[in-house]
Amino acid sequence: MIVHPPEFLAVRFEEHRPHLRAVAYRMLGSLAEADDAIQETWLRLSGSEDRRIDNLGGWLTTVVGRVCLDMLRARKRRGEEPLEQRLPDPVISRDGVGGADPEQQALLADSVGLALLVVLESLSPAERLAFVLHDLFGLPFEEIAPIVDRTPATAKKLASRARLRIRGATPPPDPDRSAGRRVVDAFLTAARGGDFDALLALLDPDVVLRADGGALTGGLRTIRGAAAVAGQLGTFQRMAAAATTRPALVNGFAGLVNTLDGQPLSVMSFTVAGGRIAAIDILSDPARLARLDLASAED
């Protein structure tokens, strides 16, 4: 067994922080709650009398997973509004950026777009944990099982059920990011020009538009189907005319950041699948936009 002194644990914990934040973000869909989960994980580590930890990374992943599971269950017990009633927090970076810090790189890894995070919110806490830890971070079911108080076989079934629901709810995004950017650029051109036919041609027949303007606009609004989404052309055109728009990566995929008089107006995330737009997620809640790090998307 390896005995770690407290000062050594602090240094090692910081080395693992990017990974832990990535796990917590995928589990909770909230950057603030992810930071709370990391703090609780550190408190459990620093307060533990057992300094004999063979695999610190594995130990920390297990603990942060358990902390996140408890937080998800607490949401349900308190009857809080689930995050599926609002968009998860987006992670913004400059399009084409190659020098992101390790924490940013960890958050953007694994192609976890906003559309997938929305679907994750519909899973049970145990299903979400099993899927995130196994499918996104490669943790074996033998290590996941104790966290959810299940057998490895049952933990495997939880992940399988989650996988089926995800596949049925959102198409996998195209891996070619440059092609996705071209589709988003074409969307912006169609919006600016008020070209209904060009916009409709870019949309998947089953496209989903989710717009979250916060409490003042009634929260999350969902529109489904290409004709209905294209019917929002007037709104898109007005926004394109009034705002300053710049390309950005939103959770690693092509997106847009819109500002008005230097203030954030909205963040738009696009899921491009099969060469067409399968999902558009728009966050325009002023309170939440003010908490985002939009400076990382600037040139």
Image (cartoon, rainbow, N blue to C red):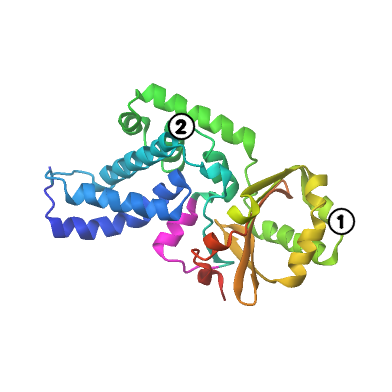
Q: Please provide the residue range marked out in magenta.
A: 97-109
- Which residue is tagged 2? 127
Establish if 22 lies above or below 284.
Answer: above
Q: Earlier in the sequence, mark 1 or mark 2?
A: 2
| Residue 214 seen | no
- Give me the residue at 21% from left, 58% from top: 10
**Based on the displayed image, in which of its 4 quarters is residue 186 positioned?**
bottom right
Q: Quadrant of the C terminus?
A: bottom right
**Based on the displayed image, in which of its 4 quarters is residue 105 positioned?**
bottom left
Describe the element under mark 1 as helix, strand or loop: helix
Tell me which amino acid carries mark 2: Glu
**Nearer the observer, 68 or 101:** 68
**Based on the displayed image, in which of its 4 quarters is residue 126 positioned?**
top left
| Residue 195 seen | yes
* Residue 285 in picture, x, y percent from top left: 59, 59
- Which residue is tagged 1? 196
- Give me the residue at 39% from left, 51% from top: 34
Residue extending furthest front? 216
Cα gap from disc 1 to disc 2, whole angstroms: 41 Å
- Give me the residue at 36% from left, 34% from top: 140
Tell me which amino acid carries mark 1: Phe
Q: How many marks?
A: 2
* Residue 269 in picture, x, y percent from top left: 63, 56
- Give me the residue at 42% from left, 55% from top: 32
**Label 2 neighbour load within 10 Å: few <14, some 14-19, many 20+:** many
